[in-house]
Image (cartoon, grey):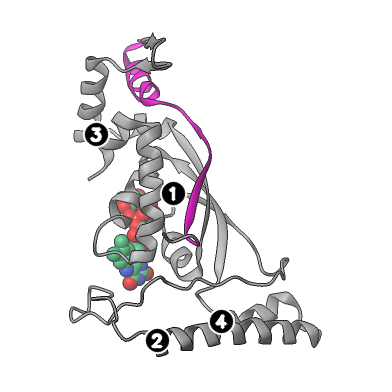
Amino acid sequence: MEKHIVASCIEYMGSDHTITNSARVSFAKHEYPEYDENTDTYILSEKDTKLISYLAKHRHMSPFGHNFATFHCKAPVFVARQLVKHKFLRWNEISRRYVDDKPKFYTPLRLRERSKDKKQGSGEVLRDDDLAFNILNDYHQRAVNDYDRLLAEGVCPEQARMILPQSMITEWYWSGSMDAFSDMCNLRTKSDTQYETRVLANQIDSILEDIWPVGWKALRC
Ligand SMILES: Cc1cc2nc3c(=O)[nH]c(=O)nc-3n(C[C@H](O)[C@H](O)[C@H](O)COP(=O)(O)OP(=O)(O)OC[C@H]3O[C@@H](n4cnc5c(N)ncnc54)[C@H](O)[C@@H]3O)c2cc1C
């Protein structure tokens, strides 16, 4: 379990019915979903399920854009650096100009070997990893000490952060529409993405599948 790489859903808006009704407005139509008291849920009709798959298949994307979600994510900087490139997801991140708390670092559960295929970032699990883990842990300890020493010397946080490594845990709010999150998950859950980035994308994938089961499945490929 990667306890330092976490996505928590803060809030969300919309349902599978939001998708179908925002498509139906083209014909000045709106359908009220049937409520199931036993399961305390609204039932999506077969007609609605078919409409959602039609919309997804023909890339009629705007009806999916009325569902929104906000996540609070925590991950190392090198993961955040990859994910911030998804331009349609709004991003607000902790700033080490203002915060000088003791930094936390990500230590992987396993280290991986270099891959033989350059396009694949890593290969098999590294077997003899004692020395490598020692190097990593020593470096983290040194980074914290040196960061504190720079602050103690009177250096401002926005400059002292220069010596903090990419393994430092950062955190951000990440919000956007269902279609923007599905674009991100379609790319970042694939096996050719970096494992640590996939860990975060997989969590978002499974949360959004619970929230919007039919629409989410239709957009995922
Ligand atoms: C396995 C992998 C490896 C990668 N390696 C690198 C790398 O080495 N270096 C690097 O810099 N990046 C890399 N990336 C990032 C990649 O280049 C994209 O920036 C990132 O995946 C976001 O994709 P996107 O632009 O489709 O996403 P989003 O910003 O979420 O955009 C979604 C979609 O909106 C449309 N769109 C977005 N912006 C515009 C625009 N300005 N004009 C018109 N249409 C737009 C496009 O259809 C786009 O696909 C990598 C990504 C992956 C998944």
User: Pointer 2: residues within 10 angstroms few (<14), some, or many (20+)?
Assistant: few
Distance between mark 2 and mark 1 Cα atoms:
41 Å
> Mark 2 CB in 8 Å range of ligand 1?
no
Say if mark 2 contacts mark 1, CB within 8 Å.
no
Query: Residue 190 sits in which quadrant?
Result: bottom left
Residue at numbered disc 4: 140
What's under tag 4, amino acid-wise? His
Q: Residue at x 26, y 42 (%)?
A: 220
What's under tag 2, amino acid-wise? Asp
Residue at numbered disc 1: 88
Which circle, 3 or 4, is nearer the viewer? Answer: 4
Q: Quadrant of the N terminus?
A: bottom left
Q: Earlier in the sequence, mark 1 or mark 3?
A: 3
Q: Earlier in the sequence, mark 3 or mark 4?
A: 3
User: Pointer 1: residues within 10 angstroms few (<14), some, or many (20+)?
Assistant: some
Residue at numbered disc 2: 130
Residues in magenta, as a range:
4-30
Distance between mark 1 and mark 3 Cα atoms:
19 Å
Frontmost residue, 153 versus 181: 153
Q: Residue at x 65, y 64 (%)?
A: 95
Residue at numbered disc 3: 56
